[in-house]
């Protein structure tokens, strides 16, 4: 069986509609690439081979009958393990949900299915999306296709690794505090977190409800944009989804003249890795040469973003994860026979350390006597962070800076220091708290021994300005070619 | 009818201080009412009491991971209507909060409720005595499922009820006696029934009452309060309060330091007539309320509010006044006939068709309501009757025309209730057409007069009423079929004709 090199999303769907390939061939090739990389990456928790082949055959039959095909016809993709596809195990990489197959399909997954996209696998992740390295999975760590001794980032570790290894043209992750943008930066992908509410959360297993957004990975910005557009638009099953229908793409600004790019000084701190700083500054210079004007701006409350995030997100998580009690689904541990002890045993054995740490933290900040000092105060700081952005956007059209303070770090490097791990998200968390659209895209490489490691640039737009952010991203990818470079593993698979 | 009994009972004002040896009770009520919406509060499941366990559930109300709540606008409308009916202020915006606790009947591990921004604040109910029970608030929340512990070794969980909309109304501690609690509950039920927002059926659990009781001496501050639960009828609410007051007095007056009133929840055991401790304050819950991030805050605009005001029917108080003013009913009759909207609708239709509200009121009270199988649920029971308002109106018409006498009418109505047949048909079948054939009647009357010289003398002396003593025997001779008025006339004529 040929593993044939990966096509992009836009390109692949066009090839299928033109009859140059079939959905079945694309699905089989993706499954083959998946098997070839499985051992090296540990990026997959479940493969829906039968479902994928069946959907592919049905699609080919429709094409043979001359029926109109959707925008993503025949494009294989992977879901993160916190996403619901009816009957396919979605265990959130947790023991507490081992064997859990949802009885329904998420709205965003359904929209992709309706457009002809073909889910083939469920990707590994940090348990319940809590982590920045993929090391918190109950089912083993995912490796970075650029260097298997390093992290692909997290929490959407498996989704990023599958796209970066050339297994699938796109994959879905969920971004709560950077869980798509940071792995995108660490694996040379475009990762896009839309405006909060742009994509329905119905069927996304919640970590922190006021922050979670479904976010796609692909190699090009055009690809993540197409996938985002297909999934976007109001959903009556999620009242926090934006009321408007799917957004329309904007043409990329051919000349960047007049575009003001805000560069927040807080996003270039002294602790920033020097090579990361250099690559991002070079990218900004490139945009400046293209006609954009760089405007220094300030987001003064950024230093409080991580603390605020870990109060808000853990508070919501402590409540969202209360349902994993062994009563209705997941493995149950009986304890001494009492209800209380069943809860205690089920949760003690079901959750990993990081999840427990966050449940405890979240429970604490909501507790009587501590609520005002922690949770209420965090909500106030969240408002201040939002105001920071609003003020900055009075002076610029888009904010740009690095996505991650470092390139991919070594597996095991930060597992003993949760706070160091939390700081990986220092540059992504502010846009999450403010609910803003934010794109990470490749902007170069740094040398780490014998390997090159990717660096990501982050573009943040005002609320609802998804089309603007993506159009600028596309423009940058016309000016640069970093995103076309394949990871060593992807080259190996394609060979 | 119970509503009127309680009205009479609570005509008394503030309780006599001697009643509880000088102790003053302080009582507050928390009432949960299921709203009679078609679907649950946050999903599309249709709830039905008594359905097969776990058949009225979906991804949302069984808390499948990833499922999200969507507010049912009908439930919101009903909550607002309840608030308007109780004179509450409706908040221009409101929000939902999560109340976090673990129990096997609570699928999400939290209940979506309202903490600091309920839909309604204020309002209240003025009792017959003029004493007002103020409401603190009314909020909207979802019900939990049911844990069933008495079917073998395992606890069984039924999530049919999980997510059913409830309004919780909380009073200020304005209730001063068990009787006031009883009257308040009757009035609350009546108001919510007329507003059309709830069945208020305690037997089906669609109305649940929790009570807070403390007692204190005049002039001193409030003491520890005890919460009473497991109260399955208004009578039990009153009885439990009475018992709890006595229990607290006994403890305070025992001067035994080993006996204390502690802040706790106690369950009422109706059979034993006692309350038992459920959990102490040491296990008091910290519910960790915080704003529900899955639902947007709710704006109540003027148009929505106006629509709910319009849809709110006549209040029971307004109905009672109208029945007295326009239909000439007594306060008592008006009270009985407005206890439930089903009864008042039934009455109004019958009164219109028979043309005599008074007659309709009498027949309904004496014959229909008295015979209902379930006095607790006149609304349900009257709808299930085999007699319609039109059917009763026809019967009343037959009595008005003299075709039937009143006892005959009662007999026909009983047969109507049993068979569902028309009054006219039953009158023929039962042979109850009144005998007005003067030939037969005259013969019976002559026989009745034999040997009744005293009566004859009295009538001749002008005491016509004395003739009443002879009507009975004639009626008996006719087996009840005679028209008593005609009999009276014949008897009087015969006496006058006597020498």
Image (spheres, coloured by chain):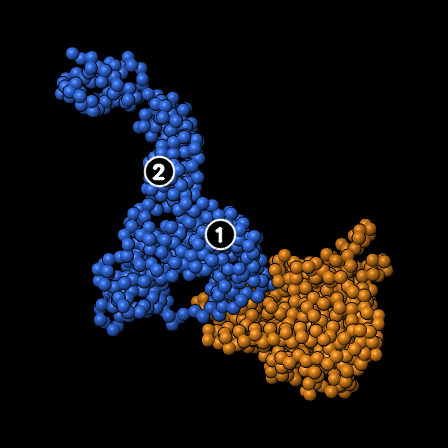
Q: In this view, does B471 lie to the left or right of B149?
A: left
**Whether residue B3 is visible:** yes
Secondary structure beneath dot 1 equals helix
Q: Which residue is drawn at 28% across and 22% down?
A: B485
Picture coordinates of residue A73, whole percent (x, y): 78, 59
Question: Which quadrant is the N terminus of chain B positioned in?
Answer: top left
Q: Which chain carries label 2?
A: B
Q: Which mark is residue A203?
A: none
Q: Nearer the viewer, residue A66 or B351?
A: B351
Q: Which residue is drawn at 68% across and 87% down?
A: A271
Q: Is mark 2 on a helix, strand or loop?
A: loop
Q: In this view, does B348 lie above or below B189?
A: above
- Decide which of A419, B394 is in the foreground and name it: B394
For the C terminus of chain B, which image quadrant? top left
Which residue lies under the disc numbered 1? B81
Chain A's shade in the image?
orange
Where is residue A202 drawn, in percent x and y?
63, 61
Residue A210 vs residue A335, the one in the foreground: A210
Q: Mark 1 lies on which chain?
A: B
Residue A342 visible? The answer is: no
Work out how far the residue at label 2 is from the one at label 1, CA to CA, in angstroms.
29 Å
Q: Read off the residue under disc 2.
A: B329
- The quadrant in which residue A239 appears is bottom right
């Amino acid at each position: 069986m040929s593993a044939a090199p990966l096509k992009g999303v836009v390109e692949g769907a066009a090839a299928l509609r033109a009859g140059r390939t079939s959905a079945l061939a694309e699905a089989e090739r993706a499954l083959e690439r998946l098997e070839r990389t499985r051992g090296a990456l540990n990026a997959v928790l479940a493969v829906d081979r039968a479902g994928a082949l069946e959907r592919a055959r049905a699609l080919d039959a429709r094409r043979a009958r001359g029926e109109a095909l959707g925008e993503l016809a025949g494009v294989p993709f992977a879901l993160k393990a916190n996403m619901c596809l009816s009957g396919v195990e979605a265990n959130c990489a947790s023991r507490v949900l081992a064997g859990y197959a949802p009885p329904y399909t998420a709205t965003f997954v359904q929209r992709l299915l309706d457009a002809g996209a073909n889910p083939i696998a469920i990707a590994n992740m940090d348990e319940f999306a809590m982590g920045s390295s993929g090391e918190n999975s109950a089912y083993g760590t995912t490796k970075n296709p650029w260097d298997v001794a390093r992290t692909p980032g997290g929490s959407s570790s498996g989704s990023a690794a599958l796209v970066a290894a050339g297994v699938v043209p796109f994959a879905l992750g969920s971004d709560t505090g950077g869980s798509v943008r940071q792995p995108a930066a660490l694996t040379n992908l475009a990762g896009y977190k839309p405006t909060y509410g742009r994509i329905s959360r119905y069927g996304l297993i919640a970590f922190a409800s006021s922050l979670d957004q479904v976010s796609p990975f692909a190699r090009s910005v055009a690809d993540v944009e197409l996938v985002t557009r297909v999934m976007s638009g109001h959903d009556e099953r999620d009242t926090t989804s934006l009321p408007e229908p799917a957004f329309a793409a904007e043409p990329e600004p051919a000349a960047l003249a007049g575009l003001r790019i805000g560069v927040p000084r807080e996003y270039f701190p002294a602790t920033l890795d020097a090579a990361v700083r250099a690559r991002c500054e070079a990218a900004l210079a490139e945009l400046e040469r293209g006609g954009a004007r760089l405007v220094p701006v300030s987001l003064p409350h950024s230093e409080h973003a991580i603390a605020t995030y870990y109060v808000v997100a853990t508070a919501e998580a402590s409540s969202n994860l209360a349902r994993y009690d062994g009563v209705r689904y997941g493995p149950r541990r009986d304890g001494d026979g009492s209800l209380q002890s069943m809860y205690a045993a089920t949760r003690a054995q079901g959750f990993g350390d990081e999840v427990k740490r966050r449940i405890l933290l979240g429970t604490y900040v909501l507790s009587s006597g501590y609520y005002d000092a922690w949770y209420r105060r965090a909500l106030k700081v969240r408002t201040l962070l939002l105001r920071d952005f609003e003020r900055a956007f009075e002076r610029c059209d888009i904010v740009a800076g690095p996505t991650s303070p470092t390139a991919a770090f070594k597996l095991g490097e930060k597992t003993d220091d949760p706070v160091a791990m939390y700081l990986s998200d220092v540059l992504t968390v502010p846009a999450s708290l403010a609910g803003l659209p934010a794109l990470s895209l490749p902007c170069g490489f740094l040398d780490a021994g014998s390997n090159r490691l990717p660096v990501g640039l982050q573009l943040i737009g005002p609320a609802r300005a998804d089309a603007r952010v993506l159009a600028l991203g596309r423009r940058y990818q016309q000016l640069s070619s970093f995103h076309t470079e394949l990871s060593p593993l992807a080259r190996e698979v394609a060979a | 009818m119970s509503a009127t009994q309680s009205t009479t009972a609570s005509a008394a004002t503030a309780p006599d201080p001697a009643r509880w040896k000088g102790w003053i009770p302080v009582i507050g009520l928390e009432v949960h009412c299921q709203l009679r919406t078609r679907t649950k509060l946050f999903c599309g499941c249709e709830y039905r009491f008594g359905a097969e366990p776990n058949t009225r559930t979906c991804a949302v109300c069984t808390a499948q991971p990833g499922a999200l709540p969507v507010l049912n606008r009908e439930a919101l409308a009903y909550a607002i209507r309840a608030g308007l009916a109780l004179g509450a202020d409706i908040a221009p915006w409101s929000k939902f909060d999560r109340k976090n606790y673990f129990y096997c009947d609570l699928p999400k591990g939290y209940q979506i409720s309202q903490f600091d921004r309920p839909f309604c604040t204020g309002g209240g109910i003025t009792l017959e005595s003029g004493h007002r029970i103020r409401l603190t608030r009314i909020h909207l929340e979802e019900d939990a499922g049911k844990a069933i512990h008495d079917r073998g070794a395992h606890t069984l969980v039924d999530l049919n009820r999980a997510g059913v909309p409830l309004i919780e109304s909380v009073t200020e501690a304005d209730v001063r006696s068990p009787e006031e609690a009883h009257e308040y509950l009757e009035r609350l039920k009546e108001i919510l029934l007329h507003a059309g927002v709830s069945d208020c059926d305690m037997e089906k659990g669609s109305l649940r009452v929790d009570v807070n009781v403390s007692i204190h001496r005049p002039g001193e501050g409030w003491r520890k309060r005890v919460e009473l639960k497991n109260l399955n009828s208004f009578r039990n609410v009153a009885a439990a309060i009475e018992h709890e007051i006595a229990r607290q007095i006994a403890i305070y007056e025992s001067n035994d330091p080993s006996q204390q009133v502690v802040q706790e929840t106690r369950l009422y055991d109706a059979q034993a007539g006692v309350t038992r401790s459920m959990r102490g304050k040491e296990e008091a819950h910290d519910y960790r309320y915080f704003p529900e991030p899955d639902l947007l805050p709710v704006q109540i605009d003027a148009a929505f509010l106006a629509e709910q005001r319009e849809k709110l029917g006549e209040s029971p108080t307004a109905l009672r006044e109208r029945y007295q003013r326009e239909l000439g009913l007594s306060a008592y009759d008006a009270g009985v006939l407005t206890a439930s909207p089903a009864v008042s609708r039934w009455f109004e239709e019958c009164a219109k068709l028979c043309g005599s509200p008074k007659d309709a009121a009498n027949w309904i009270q004496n014959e229909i309501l008295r015979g209902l199988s379930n006095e607790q649920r006149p609304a349900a029971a009257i709808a299930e009757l085999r007699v319609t308002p039109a059917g009763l109106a026809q019967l009343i018409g037959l009595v008005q025309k003299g075709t039937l006498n009143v006892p005959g009418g009662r007999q026909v109505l009983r047969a109507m209730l049993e068979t569902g047949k028309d009054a006219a048909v039953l009158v023929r079948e039962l042979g109850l057409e009144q005998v007005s054939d003067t030939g037969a009647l005259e013969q019976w009357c002559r026989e009745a007069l034999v040997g009744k010289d005293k009566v004859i003398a009295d009538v001749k002396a002008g005491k016509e009423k004395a003739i009443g003593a002879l009507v009975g025997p004639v009626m008996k001779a006719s087996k009840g079929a005679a028209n008593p008025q005609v009999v009276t006339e014949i008897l009087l004529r015969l006496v006058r004709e006597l020498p």
